[in-house]
Image: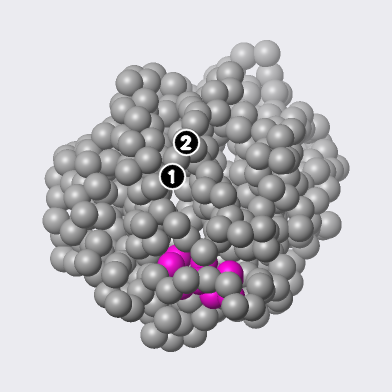
């Protein structure tokens, strides 16, 4: 029986398990109950054991949900070991009035299912299980399984793997927390932009003052802040902060029509910046004002504003040092004196980017596997989002090849209302996982590997 035929025979069971898992509101954010997270954990432990993973345990660290760790030894001493990563926690549903069906009631849509977390990342958890089932728990490689329980909120586990390198030692890892550029287009993500936060604030007066009596001479803190923020971009909308790395993007990217639809850009509103979309989104910097403290319009008084504050989110080139990128933005802001007023600039959290090496045997196996599953050559993309654990795992296993692919697609509404996954993408991801371990085992040590 071919790999595809075996996976097709498993799909009804995989779909049923995905529905069970997606029905659990495993939100690991503060203020949400911990019991559903534990329920999802326990369900997956049982599913892993049923799939033939005899060693399954939990990594319990302070301040985070339990991490599921499983292990299948290599079938022989010369076989490679592959680490499989995904996470079983999900984003909060947000405003449930914006959902077409209850977010934790998996609901059929054309070609798939709708539910919170069903794409990000429970479909990828199920894809890993599907590969194990296809091989009846005896794949041609050693397997280490890491299913995280608090990825969406942020977790101390991000920095844990380098402290326990033997546990996470492997030859390749498949980070399944993303997916294809569009449905039907097999995609490898080869880079992640880094992230940093900066807070800038202005205080000009002891307290608000009547705008009629004092406006025109008394410095308005909000105008000062907006003047400073206006220097972060040039007239085209490109970032104008010196020292932030930007390069041409040579991989695949969206069409402008796709991007406008995905971003919800209104008719008649232009996109900002210049160069290709890949360069603007992935290999160049972006600065977004993600928060602003200022008087609200509805209850605004006729007064000069004495205080204003903004929180900035910086995304930067995958290979730029996080502290260097943040310092470039901080230095730019501290050099300003808008209307003669100094700014208070406070650096916040940073997260490094990541750029994968793509020339090794695992990448060659993945390209073959994706072509087998989808029937066409894989595309290369990056992402502006970050997966902090990637760097932690890469530091724990510095010689391992890191592959990022999975069952999501960029149209799946992850983190948004009406998130969905397509069965075609889930099925093809399972086929690709099976083909990958087969091809990797054969290429790592010629003659090894079984046929799934």
Residue 334 falls left or right of residue 301: right
Residue 420 appears in the rendering: yes
Q: Residue at x 63, y 63 (%)?
A: 79
Name the image quarter holding residue 376: bottom left
Q: Residue at x 61, y 33 (%)?
A: 157
Q: Name the residue beneath numbered marker 2.
A: 56
Label at residue 12: none
Residues shaded magenta: 432-442
Q: Nearer the viewer, residue 125 or 279?
A: 125
Considering the whole magenta stretch, tell me its main secondary structure.
helix
Looking at the image, is 324 positioned above or below residue 205? below
Residue 296 spot, x, y in % from top left: 43, 29
Quarter placement of the C terminus = bottom left
Name the image quarter holding residue 154: top right
State the SS at label 1: loop
Residue 336 spot, x, y in % from top left: 81, 42
Q: Would you say the residues marked 1 and 2 are in contact, meaning their CB atoms lie under 8 Å apart?
A: yes
Residue 261 appears in the rendering: no
Quarter placement of the N terminus = bottom left
Instruction: Tell me the colour scheme of the image.
Output: one colour
Q: Residue at x 25, y 62 (%)?
A: 10
Q: Name the residue beneath numbered marker 1.
A: 53
Residue furthest toward the front? 76
Q: Nearer the viewer, residue 5 or 320?
A: 5
Residue 4 spot, x, y in % from top left: 32, 75
């Amino acid at each position: 029986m071919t790999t595809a035929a075996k996976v097709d025979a498993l799909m009804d069971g995989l779909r049923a398990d995905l529905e069970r898992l997606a029905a659990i509101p495993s939100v690991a954010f503060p203020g949400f109950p911990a019991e559903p997270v534990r329920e999802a954990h326990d369900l997956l432990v049982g599913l892993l054991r049923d799939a033939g993973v005899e060693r399954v345990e939990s990594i319990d660290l302070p301040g985070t949900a339990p991490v599921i760790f499983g292990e299948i030894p290599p079938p022989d001493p010369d076989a490679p070991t592959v680490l499989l990563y995904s996470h079983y926690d999900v984003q909060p549903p947000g405003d449930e009035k914006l959902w077409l069906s209850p977010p934790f009631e998996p609901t059929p849509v054309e070609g798939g299912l709708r539910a919170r977390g069903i794409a990000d990342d429970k479909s990828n958890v199920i894809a890993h299980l599907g590969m194990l089932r296809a091989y009846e728990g005896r794949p041609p490689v050693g397997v280490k399984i890491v299913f995280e329980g608090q990825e969406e909120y942020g977790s101390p586990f991000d920095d844990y793997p380098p402290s326990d390198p033997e546990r996470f030692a492997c030859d390749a890892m498949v980070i399944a927390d993303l997916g294809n550029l569009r449905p039907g287009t097999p995609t490898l993500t080869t880079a992640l932009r880094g992230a940093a936060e900066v807070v800038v604030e202005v205080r000009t007066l002891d307290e608000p003052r009547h705008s009629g009596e004092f406006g025109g001479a008394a410095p308005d803190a909000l105008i000062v802040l907006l003047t400073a923020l206006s220097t972060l971009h040039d007239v085209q909308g490109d970032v104008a902060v010196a020292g932030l790395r930007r390069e041409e993007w040579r991989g695949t990217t969206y069409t402008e029509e796709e991007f406008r639809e995905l971003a919800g850009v209104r008719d008649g509103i232009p996109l900002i910046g210049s160069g290709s979309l890949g360069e603007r989104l992935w290999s160049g910097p972006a600065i977004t004002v993600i928060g602003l403290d200022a008087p609200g319009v509805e209850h605004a008084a006729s007064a000069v504003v004495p205080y204003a504050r903004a929180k900035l989110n910086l995304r930067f080139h995958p290979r730029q040092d996080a502290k260097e990128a943040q310092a470039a933005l901080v230095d730019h802001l501290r050099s300003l004196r808008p209307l003669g007023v100094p700014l208070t600039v406070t650096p916040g959290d940073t997260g490094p980017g990541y750029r994968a090496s793509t020339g090794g045997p695992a990448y060659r196996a993945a390209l073959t596997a994706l072509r087998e599953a989808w029937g066409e050559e894989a595309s290369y993309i990056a992402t502006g989002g970050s997966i902090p654990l990637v760097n932690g795992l890469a530091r724990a296993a510095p010689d391992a090849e890191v592959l990022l692919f999975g069952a999501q697609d960029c149209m799946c509404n992850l983190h948004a209302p009406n998130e969905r996954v397509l069965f075609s993408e889930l099925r093809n991801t399972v086929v690709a996982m099976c083909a990958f371990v087969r091809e990797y085992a054969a290429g790592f040590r010629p003659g090894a590997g079984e046929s799934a």
